[in-house]
Amino acid sequence: MTEQVLGSKKKKDRTKAFVPYLLMAPIVLWIVFTIFVPLLSVIKESFYSTGFVGTTGSFIGVQNYVDVLTSGIYWDAWGKSALWVVLNGFFQSVLAF
């Protein structure tokens, strides 16, 4: 009799251990489909040269990255963004006090 009760209790414990994962599954799937799938698609697309949405581009490898990282316009924008972040952090800290 006690073996049946213990076996039943172990089965309930395993079921209880599975419930949190079952409850988390919808949000994990939502994150995967709304963040990671588009992110991987954009990364894949960055290795192609496409002119218009929906057109088939030719594979160019890392040339897009080389073009961006050697562009002065990119680094100017990056510098302005960094300045914006630093100054906003400073002024928000001062105003918070």
Image: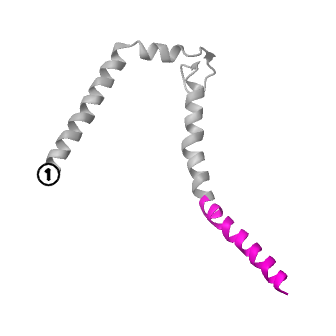
The chief SS type of the magenta part is helix
Q: Based on the displayed image, in which of its 4 quarters is residue 44 positioned?
A: top right
Quadrant of the image containing the N terminus: bottom right
The crowd level at tag 1 (other Cα within 10 Å; few <14, some 14-19, many 20+) is: few
Q: Who is closer to the viewer here, 42 or 57?
A: 42
Residue 57 in the image: x percent, y percent? 61, 18
- Which residue is rendered at x = 30% and y = 29% of the image? 81
| Start-end of magenta stretch | 1-24
- Which residue is rendered at x = 65% and y = 63% of the image? 22
Residue found farthest to the bottom: 1
Q: Which residue bears the numbered disc 1?
A: 97
Q: Who is closer to the viewer here, 3 or 66?
A: 3
Count of picture labels: 1
- Which residue is rendered at x = 71% and y = 70% of the image? 15
Q: Who is closer to the viewer here, 9 or 89?
A: 9
Residue found farthest to the front: 2
Disc 1 residue type (three-letter): Phe
